[in-house]
Amino acid sequence: MSSVSFLIGGGALVPEIELPTSATVLELKEMIGEVIDILVSRLTLTFNGTVLADDQVVGEFHGEILPTLLFLQVQPLPGNPEFPIFVKYSAQQTVPLVISVRETTTVDELMVKIEEECGVSAENFTLHYLAKEMEFNFALSAYYISPACEVEMTLNSTDN
């Protein structure tokens, strides 16, 4: 059985998904939903400016060059509500820090909230989500942050 590979663009994360050529767009969206932990009903995929229907077979539009780039749009949560995320900052930590954010919260703003909660200066740590370092000025939605996601906090080394 042959498979195809897709890069999923649209945010700061660009996951790569591989699946059989006989898979449907809905199956692709389900795999993306598992990777970025977002409900499939909030996901829209486009290819060359055309919205892909859930029942389309991925082998029908996959090009010769691997992997094919698809654009992902995530429907914002209605009303931009606050929701909890978890921040894990130590291997010994048994209970992660719970921080309330919105999809429009920026990484900078999240770092300030963490600084206020745990007392570590924002200059002394970096944040990672799905193994990607989170960059300042990006909204959390660019990283597909959703309710109950876990963000990793890594203390920066101090070389003196």
Image: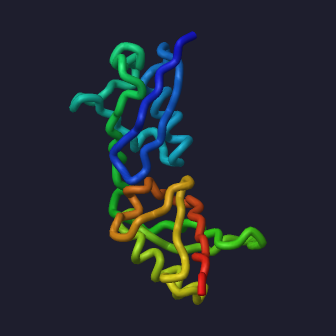
Which is more toward the observer, 54 or 64?
64
Residue drawn at the location 43% of the way across and 30% of the way down: 6
Q: How many marks?
A: 0
Q: Is residue 151 above or below residue 19?
A: below
Q: Determine the image quadrant of residue 109.
A: bottom left
User: How far across and down, in percent of the image, does residue 67 sit?
Assistant: 41, 28
Q: Quadrant of the C terminus?
A: bottom right
View extreme (left): residue: 49
Name the side, left or right, on which 21 lies relative to 75: right
Q: Name the foreground residue: 123 vs 37.
A: 123
Does residue 19 appear to the left or right of 63 in the view shown? right
Rendering coords of residue 76 (x, y %): 35, 54
Residue 95 falls in image quadrant? bottom right
Outermost residue toward the front in this view: 160
Q: Residue at x 41, y 19 (%)?
A: 58
Q: Is residue 122 left or right of residue 64?
A: right
Q: Which residue is painted at 47% across and 77% down in the image?
A: 111
Does 120 sit above or below residue 135? below
Q: Is residue 29 above or below residue 94?
A: above
Instruction: Give how far across and how far down residue 90 sits, in percent.
Output: 70, 72
Residue 1 placement (x, y as % from top left): 57, 10
Tell me the residue at 59%/61% (across/down): 150
Left or right: where 107 falls relative to 49: right
